[in-house]
Image (tube, rainbow, N blue to C red):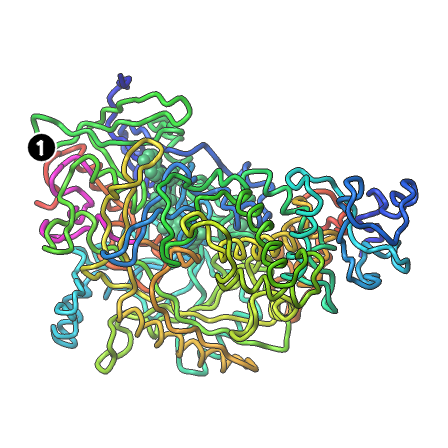
Amino acid sequence: MAEKGPDEKQFSRRDFLKTTGVATGGIIGGSLLGGFVGFNMNGDSGGDTAQNDQESGGDIAQGQQDPGRVFFHNDAEFETISQAMERIFPEDDMGPGAITLGAPYFLDMQLAGQYGNNTREYMQGPFYAGETTQGYQARLRRAELFRLGIERLNAEANEQFDDDFSNLDGEDQDEILTRFQEGEADLGVPEDTAKPEDFFGLLRSATIEGVYADPLYRGNRGMEGWKMKNFPGHQYQYIDRIQSDSMVEIDPQPLFGGDHNGNGNG
Amino acid sequence: MATEMDRVDVVTVGVGWTGGIVAAEAAKAGLQVVGLERGRERGTEDYQHIHDEYKYAIRYELMQDVSKETLTFRNSRDQRALPMRQLGSFLLGENLGGAGTHWNGQTWRFLPYDFEIRSMTEERYGSEKLRDDDGYRVQDWGITYDELEPYFDQFEKTAGISGEENPLSGPRSNPYPTPPMMKTRILEMFEEASSNLGYDPIMMPSANLSEQFENPDGQTIAACQYCGFCERFGCEYGAKSSPEVTVIPAARETGNFEVRTHSNVVEILTDEDDDSQVTGVRYVDTRTGEEFIQPADVVVLNSYVFNNYKLLRVSDIGQQYDPETEEGTLGRNYCYQIFGGATGYFDEQFNTFMGAGALGMAFDNYNGDNFDHSDLDFLHGGNMAITQTGNRPIATNTIRPDTPSWGSEFKKESIENYTRTLRVQGQGASLPHKDNYIDLDDEYTDAYGIPLVQLTYNFTDQDVSAQKYLAEKAAEVVEEMGANEVVVDAEISDYSIVPYQSTHNTGGTVMGDDPETSVTNNWLQHWDRDNLFVVGAGSFVHNSGYNPTATVGALAYRCAEGVIRFAEEGGRLEEE
Ligand SMILES: Cc1cc2nc3c(=O)[nH]c(=O)nc-3n(C[C@H](O)[C@H](O)[C@H](O)COP(=O)(O)OP(=O)(O)OC[C@H]3O[C@@H](n4cnc5c(N)ncnc54)[C@H](O)[C@@H]3O)c2cc1C
Ligand code: SF4
């Protein structure tokens, strides 16, 4: 293990809170702090993950720093989607969840670019709902579908539990997500515009992608996603180890920059 | 007005494996060749940052840009065909090298049985077994394995394939050019288990080379480093045989070959006065939008199954297949594949993240007609294999069937199983059925305003039976390997275009010895146009229980020989 944690060079969340004079108890809302909101609010110490080592022990909500957002300007939207992603890949005794791993920031960047705008997909009309064997047929681009999905997560939450999605406890959030997954939620648009299960499917895969993609994409913070799976990331070769009779543990290495805990020896 | 270019001897439409092979052979024979490729130039130097699962394997950086061109799909004629809006079931190639850039390199020859499937089945089991009445259209290829063997040999030498003798495949004139890849613990477990069960396991023939090799064209292919980023990626070492490290440089070195990238061919030009000839092609510069005409003495279609079909159809060459009357040959015999396998759960952790695209072991005891079909309700079978291709974390989330697909339980299972599950699977053959075919869509168009290809396809009941059979056999192997728990694949139902299955699409422009049931003769020369050749997996009359590219490569060498002979002598090649 390399000694340097990924956060050493990064902006310290605690410093930020100190310098802005915000009390640690009440970080809900507020544009200045938007990026921190909801980060592992329900979590306990989180001290078992490398990036939290320097900060554990306090009552500050643990999690990653805000690398800035390009797609979600609205804090409430970001908070909602972050929590939904955390339900897909929650923090538990296996290790960090989607939020600590930065998956929402991964999604934020993706939605602002090629992925969000479906630039490499066939988006010519006409649009018809189609059979499941025919695949995604929505008229909405992913960026639009995520915005709509977030809106509808809150609508469903209010209808069923009289509160916004992000204020519900985990079980109630799961119930709502399941309604989307099973196509029961009301997306508020015709089927040929988009189906609730389309939104859920994208949310699920984007979460997994954000957890395990190279840290280059702002998720998989500290390569903690890879570490849970024993995946060593970018190694130049395995030719000298592939015939080993037992499992070989290798420190993971990102594509760029040896400061992600990689030892660079590939 | 389209700009007319100088006439050349040969133009190839598309420069992947088939285009590269035809170009190299023709250029070596002294013919002037132009390769028109709709995508961009690329080569080994572009793969330096290739170990990026998200960009290359999930977002398909190297593959076809379907915003410009895709196909429409339906399971049956009574459904509305809808566009495949994002890649999924198969990953179409684009740019120099085509899909040969990001293939795995599992390089199998089809079996002697494949080429004569109709006659051999009839002979052994009687004609009832062919099930013509149920709509199956099993037919011989108009070429035998023995006739094709020298071309298989040539392809394997060009690619430097690493492998060992397979007791259950057709006879070989030469051993593989390079020895098999390294055997790993996972492979040894499979070898032991399948030998115990009485099968004949061998190392998978691989285009990830076991050692550095100089091929007969003088091109050097490096030794595989087992980096684990092979399928869907280019090789940063130049160790995976691809058109960019073999046939394309060989063609270029002759001085007779020019690749013109960003050139999308939209039409094959026909001769108004002579309906036995074509005169060249029309293409669009994809960057400027300008149109060009490239006159040529010989036109060769190397643009993969769907575009080979499409260019013939939009240029009105040949007759479209009609599933009602079964008249017409263009578009018939579209086939795909099925996968029947089983997953074993172990306590032990394996180095599943290490690997190479064609690192594996396999046996052919349930492939072709290597086993008795008398009491079975399907024909053919599949190659049973274990592969260690390098599992990557976004795509590999193996969970038991009753596990939820998200949440804590999902997370636990998918993490634990990442290094603790091994899978054995049969790659099953698919036979032609009259209801599976390709056509042109009448609603959706591509970026050039040309109709999209329309695919009508579903698994047949033979597919369902074969898949189930192979899955059960795979389960026995996994069990013998010592798994704690074995999960057999669920039975297949309707074909879906969504999950990746294989880029082993076949048919649509099939070869044969009868113009009533094929589009080209066995030199891949079009029946109606003497100077037009069409080659690729679209030439397959059915799909076998193997990956296609060795057979595609062999046919491309056969085609190249035909092109050269035609350039010298002209006329019909089937009239010897
Ligand atoms: C992920 C993946 C893994 C695979 N693994 C294996 C494997 O292990 N073993 C195996 O045997 N096979 C494998 N294959 C299949 C193998 O890649 C193909 O069989 C082979 O590359 C086909 O070669 P081709 O020349 O016929 O077509 P392609 O490689 O598709 O080349 C066609 C070329 O034509 C160009 N083109 C198309 N239309 C036009 C047009 N209108 N104008 C100009 N240019 C055009 C395309 O851009 C492309 O470059 C795999 C494929 C994929 C995608
Ligand atoms: S596994 Fe081997 S052939 Fe494949 S990309 Fe890596 S080094 Fe190249």
Instruction: Indicate the chain on which mark 1 is placed.
Output: B
Q: Position of residue B12 (x, y in %)?
A: 29, 34
Q: Quadrant of the N terminus of chain A?
A: bottom right
Q: How many marks?
A: 1
Q: Determine if residue A64 is in view.
A: yes
Foreground residue, A146 or B453?
A: A146
Q: Determine if residue B223 is in view.
A: no
The answer to whether B322 is drawn above or below residue B262 in the figure is below
Q: Is residue A201 left or right of residue B536?
A: right
Please check the rendered image and state whether residue B530 is part of the magenta-colored stretch, yes or no.
yes
Foreground residue, A168 or B482?
A: A168
Foreground residue, B84 or A239?
A: B84
Q: Position of residue B476 (x, y in %)?
A: 44, 81
Disc 1 residue type? Asp
| Quarter of the view holding residue B440 | top left
**Residue at x 28%, y 29% (from the top left corner):** B30
**Residue at x 63%, y 78% (from the top left corner):** B347
The answer to whether B389 is drawn above or below residue B461 in the figure is above
Boundaries of the magenta span = B506-532
Secondary structure of the residue carrying numbered label 1 = loop
Foreground residue, B339 or B457?
A: B457
Identify the residue position indicated by label 1 in the image: B275
Circle 1 residues within 10 Å: few <14, some 14–19, many ≥20? few
**Residue at x 17%, y 32% (from the top left corner):** B568
- Give the prevailing secondary structure in the magenta stretch: loop
The answer to whether B464 is drawn above or below residue A73 in the figure is below
Please check the rendered image and state whether residue B460 is part of the magenta-colored stretch, yes or no.
no
Q: Is residue B16 left or right of residue B280?
A: right
Q: Is residue B399 left or right of residue A84?
A: left
The answer to whether B29 is drawn above or below residue B544 in the figure is above
Q: Position of residue B274 (x, y in %)?
A: 8, 29
